Amino acid sequence: MTQMMDIQAGGARARGRCDELGVAPYSDQSDGLFRPYLGPAHRATLGRLAQWMDEAGMSVETDAAGNIIGHYAGAHPDAPVLLIGSHVDSVRDGGRYDGMLGVTLGIETVAYFHSRGLRLPFALEIIGFGDEEGSRFPTYMMGSRSAAGLAQSIDDSVVDRDGTTLRAALSDWGLATSRFGTAKRNNVLAYLEAHIEQAPHLERADLPLGLVRGIASQYRYRVTLTGQADHAGTAMHERRDALAAAAEAIAAIEAIGQRDPVDLVTTVGWLSVENGAPNIVPGSVGFTIDIRAVTPGVRENAAQQISDMLQALSVRRQVRLDIERIQDLTGALCDERLTGLLCKAVEERLGVTPPMLLSQAGHDAMIMAHLAPMTMLFIRCKGGISHNPAESVENDDVEAAFQTMVTFVTRLGDTM
Ligand SMILES: [Zn+2]
């Protein structure tokens, strides 16, 4: 077993760098943080990250999808690659640590080995994905999908809120979707992503770090129930009230989600009453359904139950049912061997066994799982709050994550 040298202060610097990148010119809004894909702030951020990567002994490139990659060579020229990363884009009025902390922690991990002149049986690559949030274009995870070599169909219908096409935005950077295929990473041994938890479980357990069993698969549907618009004086037994039908459906969807409190979550997050007015029996109502679960099969089972419930309700209440699936995002389970190594690394550094968490939020890691085995390290964040300027992490927790990552990389090297 390799003797671990003193590890210190990488966490504070990783966190401080997120703070530096939390304001202009690394943000496209004057107060708070908004760092959308391919905007001026994204460009400035890649310049700063490239400096830090260079100082940490890495060669730096930006790939065809606008992802930044720092490369720290392994002990042999043909050594496989351990990829460490997360996303550099943010939502509007976002937090400083969502995504970016995983990138700056990756840079610190390389800096540790570089400063000691250590080479590993694998190369280390730190990747900062340009688009995860889909906060500029109506897309998601274009960065990791390109790096994982997944096909994407993108045409000129993909525009931002100012009407700029994705094609034009890429062209500004000298990039093109036709070259996304060249962004695929090769010879990847494994993928590691450190990310703030974005939920309050670690805070409640009074623990700085957690492991992840898996990332939820998601289905999203758009539903329309059509009955008959009528005067509010219409007798109760003569109505075909679409909103009353939707209310019953929403309560049933919540109840289905509550049957598996560990894994399944169901949400109706949007509702629209056509021509709604106090004196009209609603004739048509639209709503969305979001279903998420980590364990394979649970999401499908819930979707079937909800579909059966809606069909029965439609017949009984004489409302027409139209249902369309508008999103199907496949989740991923973290690799057991890698997660076991990560668990040992936490135990070695902190002397506690980290809890195993489920991620109901999507992450680049679920895409990278198509390319290589992956695992994730969750870091406690204050109140579980994220996608919000109030997002906050403690230096000690980030330091614990940094030490765990260095230990994980060292121990992974020991296994080879
Ligand atoms: Zn994120």
Image: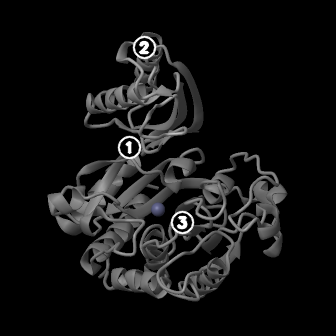
Spatial separation of the CA atoms under disc 2 and disc 1: 58 Å
Tell whether circle 3 marks a residue whose Cβ is less than 8 angstroms from ligand 1: yes
Name the colouring of the figure: one colour
Q: Secondary structure at mark 3?
A: strand
Q: Position of residue 67 (x, y in %)?
A: 65, 68
What is the quadrant of residue 64 in the picture? Answer: bottom right
Residue 179 in the image: above or below residue 240: below
Q: Evaluate if marks 2 and 1 touch, with contact meaning CB atoms under 8 Å apart.
A: no
Q: Residues within 10 Å of mark 1 (few under 14, many from 20)?
A: few
Spatial separation of the CA atoms under disc 1 and disc 3: 24 Å
- Amino acid under label 3? His
Q: Secondary structure at mark 1?
A: helix
Q: Which mark sits nearer the N-terminus, 2 or 1?
A: 2
* Residue at x 42%, y 23% (from the top left corner): 306
- Disc number placed over residue 238 in the picture, else none: 2
Q: Which mark sits nearer the N-terminus, 3 or 2?
A: 3
Q: Read off the residue under disc 3.
A: 87
* Residue at x 47%, y 20% (from the top left corner): 307
Q: Position of residue 49 (x, y in %)?
A: 57, 82
Q: Residues within 10 Å of mark 2 (few under 14, many from 20)?
A: few
Q: Which mark sits nearer the N-terminus, 1 or 3?
A: 3
410 displayed left or right of 133: left
Q: Nearer the viewer, mark 1 or mark 3?
A: 3
- Amino acid under label 1? Glu
Q: Evaluate if marks 3 and 2 touch, with contact meaning CB atoms under 8 Å apart.
A: no
Q: Read off the residue under disc 1.
A: 336
247 displayed left or right of 155: left
User: Is residue 413 something that shows in the picture?
Assistant: no
Between 161 and 82, the one nearer to me in the picture = 161
- Amino acid under label 2? Glu
